Image (cartoon, helix red, strand yellow):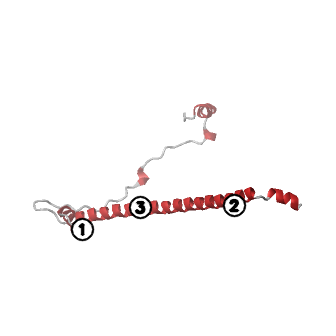
Amino acid sequence: MFKQLRTHLNLNNGVLLVALLVTGSWVWGTVGAIQQNFLLQQEVDSLDQRISFQELENQTLQFENQYYNSREYLELSARAHLNKANPGEKLIILPPNTVSDTSTTETPVVTPISQRSNFQQWMYFLFERKV
């Protein structure tokens, strides 16, 4: 048994085994580093998207702020909330809109299939329309 083991364990096989172990650990480390870099890049991309969204939201808020400070907004707000009008204009205040009475609308009368004639039932069956 030792004789067979000695023939397989020579210097060349030992060097090859060490080289394989070093190569395997190098590949394992490289794959781990690539995976870590991928995860970190995803996090960076997510943060970049959040930053661009916040910048867009800030711009929107700045535009809204400029609009609220404008004369047009002040005029529209005074007209809507304070019932004000420009000189020479007459203000007409109408009552709030009410829901119209829906009971006046007519619903079509449909006769049940059992009360239809045999011909009408066949026409409905064949052409899917009311006769």
Q: Position of residue 11 (x, y in %)?
A: 74, 59
Q: Residue furthest right?
A: 1
**In the displayed structure, would residue 105 be above or below residue 38?**
above
Residue closest to the eye, 121 or 35: 35
Q: Position of residue 52 (x, y in %)?
A: 37, 60
Q: Earlier in the sequence, mark 1 or mark 2?
A: 2
Q: Element at badge 2?
A: helix
Residue closest to the eye, 17 or 91: 17
Indicate the amino acid at tag 1: His
- Residue 103's label in the rendered image is none
Image quadrant assignment for residue 59: bottom left
Indicate the amino acid at tag 3: Asp
Indicate the amino acid at tag 2: Val
Q: Position of residue 104 (x, y in %)?
A: 41, 51
- Residue 81's label in the rendered image is 1
Distance between the alpha carbons at the discs numbered 3 and 1 = 42 Å
In the rendered image, the quadrant that contains the N terminus is bottom right
Q: Earlier in the sequence, mark 3 or mark 1?
A: 3
Q: Residue furthest bottom?
A: 82
Q: Which mark is in front, 3 or 2?
A: 2
Q: How many marks?
A: 3
Q: Which mark is in front, 3 or 1?
A: 3
Q: Element at badge 1?
A: helix
Query: Badge 3 is on which residue?
Result: 48
Query: Badge 2 is on which residue?
Result: 18
Residue closest to the eye, 127 or 20: 20
